[in-house]
Amino acid sequence: MKTPGSADHFSNPRPPVLLLGGEANALSVARELGRLGVTVYAVGESDSTVRASRHVRWINLDAAAGDKFEDLWSAFLLGPQSDHLRGAVVMACSDAGIRVLVRHRDTLLARFRLDDSDPAAQLLMLDKLTTYKHARAAGVPTPGFWEISSREEVLALRDAVTFPVMIKPRLSHLFEQKFGRKHVIVDSFDQLLANFDAASDAGMDMLLMEHVPGGDDRLCSYYTYLDERSAPLFHFTKRIIRRFPTGMGGACYHVTDRVPHIGELGNRLFKHVGLRGLANIEFKQDPRDGQYKLIECNARYTASNCLVSAAGVKLATFVYNRLTGRPLPDMTDYKVGLRLWDPFRDYKAFRELRRAGQLTFAKWIAGVCRRQTFAYFAWSDPMPAISRALKPLRKLVKSRATKTRHPTPTPTPAGSDAFDRPTRSEIPTKPEGVLT
């Protein structure tokens, strides 16, 4: 990769930003900062839609097959290729990016501007098992969970587990990179054992978590920024309306709201572990006891960051201005009732819910016929949405090209496809029973 001559941005009053990974969240950050006149660089997956944005200067990194993003980004940040970005603000928009900044924080602080953090606390929040353990210690309600590190431990739980149950990775970004999903829900012990074996064979550390009943509209999130004492500097909450696939996929319809109690619960955990900087926590309200149960934590920008920003909570601007000594944006209030909609995925969610008898077309239309926020489309920056729409076509062309070069596939051992992505026809109307 060709780079400009060496530069030092530590004296630059408006230094550039480098984003590590991410997709919708990184795009939102790039647009928010780009509109302020900040030069935004980004690294990530080769087919990322972020690179199509007019606000982004994409950096291509030469990657060999099997290279991990963490190793690739670390080598870039620590090597001469990034000399022209010395003094830039580096922001993690992915879990892999967080791990890079944590692993090399002391060295990177001599080269770049990094947000305030407690590295140990960030690592605790990345690991699902340690997150749940510390939540219990802090008095934050969690679903039931079990640590499983061997097949023998799974077998010992045969009479203890109530189905359906969720198999979750301790490090979700590695699991998602390998299997294309964040978790799997099973409703029998045979399914549990088969999926644990598949994950274990791939070198993944897993845990079991009770599946909290109720619809996706019981999911909600809290966002804040924590100072050096882990005290929150503002408060923002939102709810999820639908996910796709329903019950297990990513959110496709959100709405800003004032959700009670979850800010208090979230800050109880954040204070307990000593987290600093950006903080997000997701809960699901359990219909059995009315409690908000912890689902996950993120110490970074999330996929719905454009909604948070549109509502008036400019997280990227807040972090950037804090690091560069500029005036902080007003974060004392935000717009309620603002919605973030992914029309294509939400239509698929509607079809699943209609087949299950849970949503009519009339109610779906009534719910979406209002002013919307979109993660990828913007009239001032349309190319990311076009790039995203063409992604399936690019994957199809790449797949066929691969088959042409390798016409005889290697036989797949029985049971090794337990975590393969389901085809559309394989997704059941009740995703709690899915085995993929």
Image (tube, grey):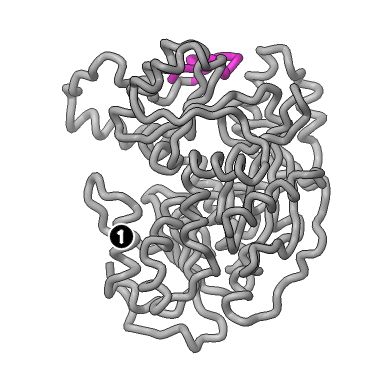
Q: Quadrant of the N terminus?
A: bottom left
**Residue 77 at what x, y percent from top left?**
34, 68
Mark 1 residue crowding within 10 angstroms, few (<14) / some (14–19) / many (20+)? some
**SS at mark 1 in the image:** loop
Camera-nearest residue between 322 and 283: 283
User: How many numbered circles are shown?
Assistant: 1
Quadrant housing residue 33: bottom right
**Residue 364 at what x, y percent from top left?**
76, 26
Residue for point 72% across, 33% down? 241
Residue annotated with mark 1: 61
> What span is colored magenta in the figure?
424-436
Camera-nearest residue between 249 and 188: 188
Residue for point 79% across, 44% down? 261
Q: As shown in the figure, which amino acid type bears the numbered disc 1? A: Leu
**Residue 402 at what x, y percent from top left?**
24, 33
Residue for point 30% across, 56% down? 71
Outermost residue to the bottom: 11
**Residue 233 at what x, y percent from top left?**
72, 65
* Residue 397 shows in the view: yes
